[in-house]
Image (cartoon, rainbow, N blue to C red):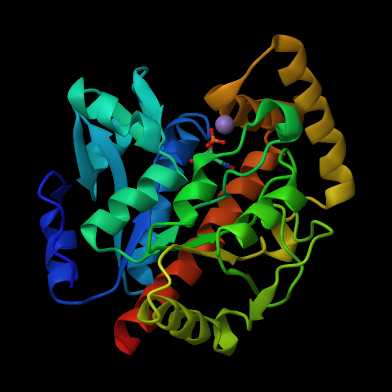
Amino acid sequence: MTTPHPMLTLTDEVRTALAEGRPVVALESTIISHGMPYPDNVAMAREVEQIVRDGGAVPATIAVLDGVPRIGLTEEQLEVLGSHPDVTKVSVRDLPYVVARRSHGATTVASTMRLAALAGIRVFVTGGLGGVHKGAESSMDVSADLQELGQSDVAVVCAGVKSILDIGRTLEVLETLGVPVIGVGGREFPSFYSRSSGFQAPMEVPAIDAGGPEQLAATMRAKWDLGLSGGIVIANPVPEEDEIPTDEMQVFIDQALADCDRLGIIGKDITPYLLGRIVEITDGRSLVTNIALVRNNARLGAALAQAYAVDG
Ligand code: PSU
Ligand code: MN
């Protein structure tokens, strides 16, 4: 067991579970503060924690509050994150600044991975990864999520990469960084709202009820036992009944991208803007899909944390 870094504050529940080798699932907080509107965001965060508990694991939502990196949050702290106007979106770059200023920060996939690793948590559930943005050949806008996947020992359960990004180039960068990308129940790489993307994952495991979690746990063990540091992307497609098919989705995404361009939005504000705009354009339908895929990922994450705890 890793001793958690002394600058982290863990809830008693998370600290005890980790010390006893029981399953723990990390959850990110940018999805709460910058990924969905209030109050659906807080309701989603609570529900996802409950799904993890029902799946036999301890949830650890990660965020920075008053400059303290926290592993596990109370209900009140979740409410603050979801509703407070001054919560910064914090990637790895931003961590030292919010800690030093004692301010609030919601962690992205990258910074959540880093803090989870510092706490000794190996399984992390989110919605979608950041990646290579369209036009990155000239803007060089590549999410720090990818770099972090190349170095922190955490398995990330997600629903793939949204097609607001350049999915092909995102998969190329993950290959370069030595990150296994594993499809669940098939090789078609999902694109968040949709079960397909036109791109293939290089590896696959069976679905959750057919031995998938056990094979994923064995892969995690093999990677880290070999000294191959870094993360694993577990690409879990949204359930069929909740998906918005790619042809429908493309129209909404093209409109949101055009609006983003017209407004001159750049850098870290791009993803939150696009997510919010897509909720507006789809009249809330994308939000329903977004919540459904996070639930689905939470179920898999809990099963994976259990399989990994047994295996270890
Ligand atoms: N995709 C979503 N919802 C989100 C994000 C991505 O569907 O909330 C967030 C995640 O926290 C992800 C971050 O790590 O956006 C990526 O932002 P950037 O591209 O600025 O690194
Ligand atoms: Mn960026």
Relative to 60, is 155 above or below?
below
For residue 185, above or below residue 279: below
Q: Is residue 292 left or right of residue 168?
A: left
Q: Is residue 103 visible?
A: yes
The answer to whether residue 60 of the structure is visible from this angle is no
In front: 119, or 71?
119
Q: Please state the horizontal and vertical placement of residue 41, each as a whole percent of the image.
A: 46, 37
State the image coordinates of residue 241 (x, y, percent, origin top left).
73, 61
Front in this rendered view, residue 164 or 59: 164
Q: Residue at x 31, y 33 (%)?
A: 95
How many tags in the picture? 0
Position of 106 with respect to 191 (left or right) is left
Q: Look at the picture and state if 1 lies above or below 298.
A: below
Residue visible at 29% across and 63% down?
A: 121
Q: Position of residue 101 (x, y in %)?
A: 20, 20
Residue at 59% from the left image edge and 54% from the top image edge = 292
Q: Locate residue 116: give its quadrant.
A: bottom left
Q: Please tell me which residue lies in front, 280 or 9.
A: 9
Q: Is residue 62 above or below residue 233?
A: above
Q: Identify the residue at the far top of this view.
A: 263
Left or right side of 293 for 90: left
Q: Position of residue 232 (x, y in %)?
A: 50, 66
Q: Quadrant of the C terminus?
A: bottom left
Which part of the image, by quadrant, shows the N terminus?
bottom left
Locate ligand 1 by image quadrant.
top right
Residue drawn at the location 34% of the way across and 50% of the way down: 114
